[in-house]
Image: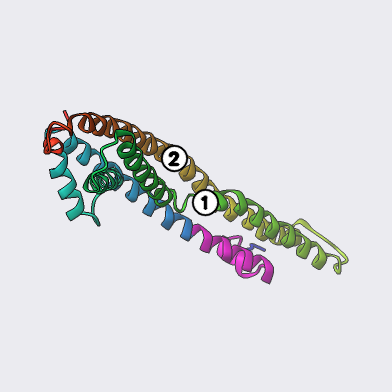
């Protein structure tokens, strides 16, 4: 007698606990893939926005022009532009208070940029913890479903006087499906987590480097501010 060993048939005939575990794993897998695609396109957008602002920053525009553009496009600009805007905003507030001490000006701007960097990195790193959890927990969830399914199968076989492979195979097969689905949910999440973690590290290094370069430019402007009230209209070069 031929038996149907398709995954759908096995799951329909599985015990309730195995069906619940598989349903949870499938929901987790769908949510994981959704998070993967969102993070992928978000990182692509961040990279494009950072590259565009960096080109503008070194194109010869004045700091005031860049700051005005960043203020107007606050909702659509990238992390690098927001960090720049936070540093400039704090710098100008301190200048408006007629604070001429260079260390005070630089410390204020640096703290503002550092706080902005932390907020940006918290946003960029969102969903990573979820992918890490999926990658680490899903195999164990599948294993739990497998153990329970095998236990349920052997419990049912205990009442039979004659046990054959044909009677054992369906119960074992439906139990192993849970492990397969657990791995199906975990493997993409782990691969995506490693890829995104590497990309986010690169973004962090890029933003840290920009902060250092911008701090050097502000330091030069602080030195020349005493002789020129329009020092910030100078090119970043």
Quarter of the image where one finds residue 141: bottom right
Query: Over which residues does the magenta segment extend?
Result: 4-29
Q: Are marks 2 and 1 in contact (CB under 8 Å)?
A: no
**In the image, 208: left or right of 157?**
left
- Cα separation, mark 2 vs mark 1, equals 13 Å
Placement of 84 over or under 212, stated as above or below: below
Q: Nearer the viewer, residue 37 or 74?
A: 74
Please check the rendered image and state whether residue 83 is part of the magenta-colored stretch, yes or no.
no
Q: Which residue is mark 2?
A: 195
Where residue 101 sits: x, y (%)?
A: 29, 36
Which residue does the image show at 23% across and 46% down from the upper left?
92
Q: Nearer the viewer, residue 122 or 89?
A: 89
The secondary structure making up most of the magenta span is helix
Where residue 207 sits: x, y (%)?
A: 34, 37
**In the image, 145: left or right of 60?**
right
Q: Taking the image as drawn, is residue 48 in sight?
A: yes
Instruction: Tell me the SS state at disc 2.
Output: helix
Q: Report the quarter where the C terminus lies.
A: top left
Q: Nearer the viewer, residue 112 or 165?
A: 112
Which residue does the image show at 21% across and 48% down from the upper left?
96
Placement of 213 over or under 118, stated as above or below: above
**In the image, 133: left or right of 90?**
right
Q: Nearer the viewer, residue 174 or 22?
A: 22
Please check the rendered image and state whether residue 11 is part of the magenta-colored stretch, yes or no.
yes
Q: Nearer the viewer, mark 2 or mark 1?
A: 1
**In the image, 151: left or right of 200?**
right
Q: Which mark is residue 24?
A: none
Instruction: Tell me the SS state at disc 1.
Output: helix
Where residue 164 sits: x, y (%)?
A: 79, 58
Disc on the earlier residue, 2 or 1: 1
Q: Which residue is mark 1?
A: 129
Where residue 142 sits: x, y (%)?
A: 64, 56
């Amino acid at each position: 007698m031929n038996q149907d060993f398709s995954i759908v048939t096995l799951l329909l005939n599985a015990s309730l606990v195995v069906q619940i575990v598989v349903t949870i794993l499938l929901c987790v897998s769908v949510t994981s893939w959704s998070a993967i695609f969102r993070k992928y396109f978000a990182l692509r957008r961040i990279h494009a926005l950072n590259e565009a602002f960096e080109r503008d920053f070194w194109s010869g525009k004045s700091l005031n022009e860049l700051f005005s553009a960043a203020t107007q496009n606050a909702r659509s600009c990238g992390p690098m532009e927001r960090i720049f805007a936070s540093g400039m905003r704090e710098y100008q507030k301190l200048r408006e208070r007629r604070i001429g001490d260079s260390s005070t000006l630089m410390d204020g701007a640096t703290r503002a940029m550092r706080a902005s960097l932390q907020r940006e990195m918290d946003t960029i790193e969102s969903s990573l913890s979820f992918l890490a959890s999926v990658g680490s927990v899903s195999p164990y969830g599948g294993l739990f479903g497998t153990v329970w399914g095998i236990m349920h199968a052997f419990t049912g076989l205990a009442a039979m006087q004659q046990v054959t492979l044909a009677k054992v195979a369906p119960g074992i097969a439906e139990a192993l499906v849970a492990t397969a689905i657990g791995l199906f949910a975990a493997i993409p999440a782990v691969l995506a987590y490693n890829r995104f973690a590497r990309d986010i590290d690169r973004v962090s290094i890029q933003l840290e480097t920009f902060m250092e370069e911008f701090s050097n430019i502000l330091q030069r402007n602080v030195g020349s501010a005493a002789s020129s009230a329009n020092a910030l209209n100078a090119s970043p070069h």
